[in-house]
Image (cartoon, rainbow, N blue to C red):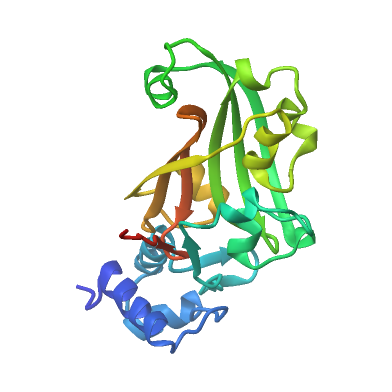
Amino acid sequence: MARFTAQNIADDLRAEIQSGELSPGAALPSERQMIDRYGVSKGTVAKAIGILKEAGAVVSVRGRGVFVPKRPPVKRISSERYRVDAGPQETPQTSFTADQGITWHEYRLDKAYRWIEADERLASLFGVPAGERILERRFVFYAKGEPSQMSRPCLLASDVEGTPVADPDREPWPGGTIAQLRSIGIEVDEIDEDVSSRMPKPEEKAALRIGSGMPVFTITRRMLSGGRVVEVADPIVIPADRAVLNYRIRLD
């Protein structure tokens, strides 16, 4: 009977990663080295590596081996970040580029637009009847080539259909959604956010390059103008190991 199980081996390697003995970017021992080190079969080593991959603790590079991933720095995301979008734009930026500390040229956005009918949840968030025509946008945000955030910001067709805001070729748009809505005469004056956490969905794992064992923050955002909801982002998804959500509360 083998002395080490796959879970034992995974725990041992994880401890080396957490201690820094295996630093970001370092290669794990080869399969042969681990077989000799732990006295186990090739299959047990493969299971141990699978456990670490599932947790996002290691990544495989075809033809090269298994490595400890290089983690992007943790970013502090402030509740006041939208002031960047609402303020004057001396140079092109959005709340995302400000959060990440990147220039416009270091920013990339994958996008997909489609027209849908609001389901019960989306209709409730907007305060409109189910079936209302909606522009659904899906974004993946990149900072210096690394995927950092996903979002699904939706807009009412009655506000944006036939305007430049509905044109995906205009993305990315300096000032983000707030600037887009302002361009068609809608001034956002209030933003409401609900924050929770959960494990990632398969498409989120793939897009954000994270393991299924890494939780994500999910934010449901509503932008309002004069008390009317004009945008719903449901959800915004951020890997939990890449962000600190900071909320300032003023007591008058």
Q: Residue at x 66, y 44 (%)?
A: 176
- 113 or 30: nearer the viewer: 113
- 214 or 182: nearer the viewer: 182
Quarter of the image with the C terminus in it: bottom left
Residue 224 position within the rendered picture, expressed as x and y whole percent measured from the top left = 49, 33
Q: Residue at x 47, y 48 (%)?
A: 237
* Residue that extends furthest to the left in the rendered view of this protein: 1
48 lies left or right of 144: left
246 lies left or right of 225: left
Quadrant of residue 83 within the rendered picture: bottom right
Q: Residue at x 48, y 40 (%)?
A: 190
Res 201 visible: no
How many tags in the picture? Answer: 0
Res 120 visible: yes
Quadrant of residue 7 within the rendered picture: bottom left
92 lies left or right of 214: right
Residue 152 position within the rendered picture, expressed as x and y whole percent measured from the top left = 54, 36
- 167 or 84: nearer the viewer: 84
Residue 89 position within the rendered picture, expressed as x and y whole percent measured from the top left = 75, 54
Residue 87 position within the rendered picture, expressed as x and y whole percent measured from the top left = 66, 53
Quarter of the image with the N terminus in it: bottom left
- 101 or 56: nearer the viewer: 101
* Residue that extends furthest to the front in the rendered view of this protein: 252
Residue 115 against residue 252 in the figure, above or below: above
Q: Residue at x 53, y 71 (%)?
A: 71
Quadrant of residue 145 within the rendered picture: bottom right
